Amino acid sequence: MKVFVPRDAAAIAVGADEVAAALVREAQKAGVEIRLVRNGSRGMFELEPLVEVETPEGRVGYARLAASDIPALVAAGMLDGKPHETCVGVVEDLPFLKAQTRLTFARCGITDPIDLEDYAEHDGYKGLAAALALGPAGIVDAVTKSGLRGRGGAGFPTGIKWKTVADAKADRKFIVCNADEGDSGTFADRMVMEGDPFMLIEGMTIAGIAVGATKGYIYCRSEYPHSIVALNKAIASAKRAGLLGDNILDTPFSFDLEVREGAGAYVCGEETALLDSIEGKRGVVRAKPPLPAHVGLFGKPTVINNVLSLAAIPFIMDKGSQAYADYGMGRSRGTMPIQLAGNIKNGGLFEVAFGVTLGELVNEIGGGTLSGRPVRAVQVGGPLGAYFPPSLFDTPFDYEAFAAKDGLIGHGGVVVFDDTVDMLGMARFAMEFCAIESCGKCTPCRIGSTRGVETIDKLRAGEAPQLQREILADLCDTMKFGSLCALGGFTPYPVMSAMTHFPEDFAAAERTLAPAE
């Protein structure tokens, strides 16, 4: 009998390890032989720790468990899938899961993340086999036709990036995975690395074959220790099986892979600062051009992709580019793993084809606010994403649709705020965040963000409010068009969207101090 307890960091944080240990003890006491599988999370965080028991009807779930619950649950027939107040039924039938289109996360929560045989039994490495049959040019063509765009935030067509590196002439090339997931309200990269690391390894291997790279690096943030452990175990297994290293599966192609732990700076999520960090330097943004596709890691042509971009590759290779392109809308093809966080009832990961509206995500799928108060603002795209009010909830989740409303999809993080939020304070936070995290190389980011904090403080104090608003807008314009990278360039998005959609919060100080003037 299989019993599944997630090894995902979110589940561990609420006691999954203790629940797993209690299950083993109580099963032994009851004389029941179980096989404990530490799977990845399904992404329904409000149910964690979610224990699943394999039954003839399917995997039956028991939610929000503590170690102290286990003795009574085992005695009540939990190991046979018997009903209980903590039982949520067959997990696959839960509405939150059934409404999804899981391409990237098809195995997450299903398999043992570090068991190569389990991965293979669930269509693992079929993508690599198909890629080897296609050859390098065929792989690049398939990725291009799939319409896959960078899932890290920029939305750049993946196939074009790969072709640029493939066409570059060099004695060495590299594949770099940007796993420095530092945006607030995002956890999809972590869930892949902890819940299905072989998928990422397979995607990077295919990328290496496509462009002629023989070495890859996964740059994982130091705050993800569970991810680093899972990745290293999976890499070791892949090497033993001949799926990494020299002459992969007895072919002429060779590709090796290693994990590099991040340096703890938000700016290292910017691709060129990340390259500096891998090289052992302080993470500082490089001027472009030259692009990393021409002059990247150690001065060699380099593909830099986000975890989710690379994780989509095995599906595209296995099922075909058209099967992936059939999902989505406009130029946004495939699915997007959307992360619902903040003041929201049903927080977690929801993978769906592009085109779902922001309102559907927040109110129907997310269930509205956890506090029960009205939604006032939603920030999409991390701490540098724009704030959208409910009046924009008809906006489809699509790169171009968000850009048309002066917003960003970014890494797919959605953070919800109720009507108690102070939007002037949120604008200040954006400027302060930029000031703290700036690498300091360019003046608009380094100085502009500091002046932004000072200007907002003057605005809050009621010092010539109209003038301060004009200065703040001018600062944002300078940062947006003058910064060297997206840290300074995107900071104006939350600030200007807050000023545009919530002007009353920027006028409150003026109204309060008006009699004194």
Image (cartoon, grey):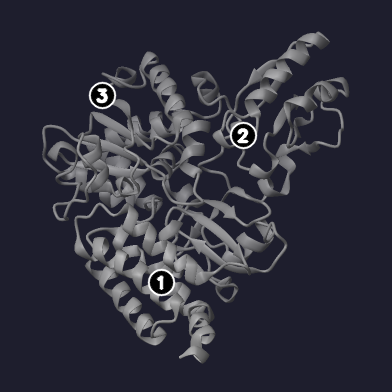
The residue singled out by tag 1 in the image is: 457
> Can residue 403 be seen in this snapshot?
no
Element under disc 2: helix
Amino acid carrying mark 2 in the image: Ala
Please name which of the two marks, 2 or 3, marks the residue nearer to the observer: 2
Which is more toward the observer, 373 or 207? 373
- Residue at the image position 42 percent from the left and 78 percent from the top: 459
- Residue at the image position 15 percent from the left and 36 percent from the top: 298
- Residue at the image position 64 percent from the left and 43 percent from the top: 45
In this picture, is 502 found above or below 349?
below
Tell me where residue 183 appears, x and y as whole percent. Answer: 43, 51
Please name which of the two marks, 2 or 1, marks the residue nearer to the observer: 1
> Can residue 139 be seen in this snapshot?
yes
Amino acid carrying mark 1 in the image: Asp
- In the drawing, does residue 256 fall left or right of residue 405? left
Please name which of the two marks, 3 or 1, marks the residue nearer to the observer: 1
The residue singled out by tag 3 in the image is: 254
Between discs 2 and 1, the one toward the N terminus: 2
What distance separates the C-alpha of mark 2 from that of mark 3?
A: 37 Å
The residue singled out by tag 2 in the image is: 11
Picture disc at residue 432: none
Element under disc 1: helix
Between discs 3 and 1, the one toward the N terminus: 3
- In the drawing, does residue 14 fall left or right of residue 1? left
Tell me where residue 332 appears, x and y as whole percent. Answer: 44, 59
Which is more toward the observer, 60 or 101? 60
Amino acid carrying mark 3 in the image: Ser
What distance separates the C-alpha of mark 2 from that of mark 1?
A: 39 Å
